[in-house]
Image (tube, grey):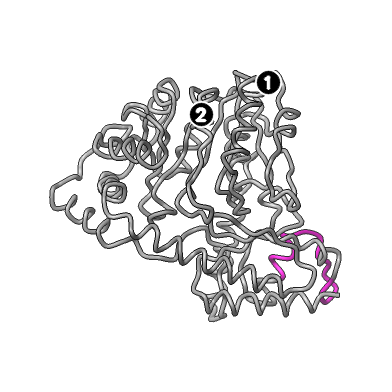
Amino acid sequence: MNNLSERLEALSPSETLAMSQRSAELKAQGIDVINLSVGEPDFNTPDHIKAAAKEAIEQNFSFYSPVPGFLGLRKAISAKLEHENQLTYKPEQILCSTGAKQSLCNVLLSIINPGDEVIVPAPYWVSYVEMVKLAEGKNVVVHTDIDHDFKMTPQQLQNAITPRTKAFILCSPSNPTGSVYSKDELAALADVLANNPNVIVISDEIYEHINYVGKHESIAQFASVRDRVVVVNGVSKGYAMTGWRIGWIAAPQWVVAACNKLQGQYTSAPNSIAQKAAEAAYTGDQTCVGTMRVAFERRRDLMVQLANEIPDVKINIPQGAFYLFPDVSAYLGKTFQGKKMETGADLSSYLLEEAHVACVGGNAFGAPSCIRLSYAAADEQLVEAMHRIKAALLKLS
């Protein structure tokens, strides 16, 4: 007997979480698996942030906070936006949630009606299209390619907009590709959106602090679209705080009010202690952010070098985040012991079983000819993983 809702039946499980689970199961069997499927920093949360959490416990911040989060945290985020991004958002225009994932889902559930179209550039983060399904919207997936650094052009955006378009999801720096839109590229997209005033822009900037091009650029800086941009961010990636689960939106007041109403009915405020830790992340010493970024950039360079040593693997050089997203189409159609590699998902399963390296097939990101490799791991692990991948790929015929 199957009494599950149609809503749930329409969803696909997270392939990134599934691959991480399969990796953990093999490790539990004593197999030496190198896990490059996980989308989280391998650093520990900085000490001054942990100290703030301990102090919050001592000070009895153990009661419900306001649904949008403590005013102190929202003021800290407001100051961060002003100082780092030159964006002015009052604390009442900020709402904190249980991770940026909830922030994104809040927005989509608050603005999308059945049949509304949401433009999603591919490759995309796995949960975007599933969240749109949950909101009963229609995904309009726009495919980009590695030759154009996996970036959507203004013409592609214009061509995708219809009278039913309600939202456009932009992710820069990008998961899974590591691509970063420049200020000029964002301005060109903003020009298209300026002529389509009914389209709401959801700008996922969770990897803001992990970029290798200098200053982060937000599409919210452009006056022509700012009154309908929702900035989504959080502390998970830049401050190595994935498990603390604090994300937030900065948005027009009506969007924040809607998300506040929704969140108040199904989770209420995020964890009170984690909020105090997040406040310390934004108001405290920022040296840790730069230290982690430097390490990720060094690993990026190492991964690019190692990937270039594998015949017929095509890569772009990531400008942010901590992923390499190689095009492995040259190996698709090949076989190993009678099993044919049809897609990146097949190849990622093969690499897990044969090379004992966990990565994620590009199918989950709307790019089945690619695989995603996280370089949020120690240098020696990255070197060994890439050697294993090379050897396994060369076994295909």
Where 197 falls versus 236 (above or below)? above
Q: Secondary structure at mark 2?
A: strand
Q: Amino acid at mark 2?
A: Val
Residue 73 in sight from this viewpoint: yes
Q: CA distance from mark 2 to mark 1?
A: 18 Å
Front-most of 117 and 208? Answer: 208
Which residues make up the magenta segment?
Answer: 335-350
Q: Quadrant of residue 26?
A: bottom right
Q: Position of residue 27 (x, y in %)?
A: 53, 75
Residue wearing tag 2: 229
Q: Secondary structure at mark 1?
A: loop
Front-most of 228 and 110? Answer: 228
Q: Position of residue 366 (x, y in %)?
A: 70, 47
**347 within the magenta span:** yes
Tell me which residue sits at (76%, 74%) in the image: 393
Neighbour class for label 1 at 10 Å: few (<14), some, many (≥20)? few
Residue wearing tag 1: 164
Q: Circles 2 and 1: CB distance less than 8 Å? A: no
- Give left or right: position of 71 versus 38: left
Tell me which residue sits at (72%, 80%) in the image: 391
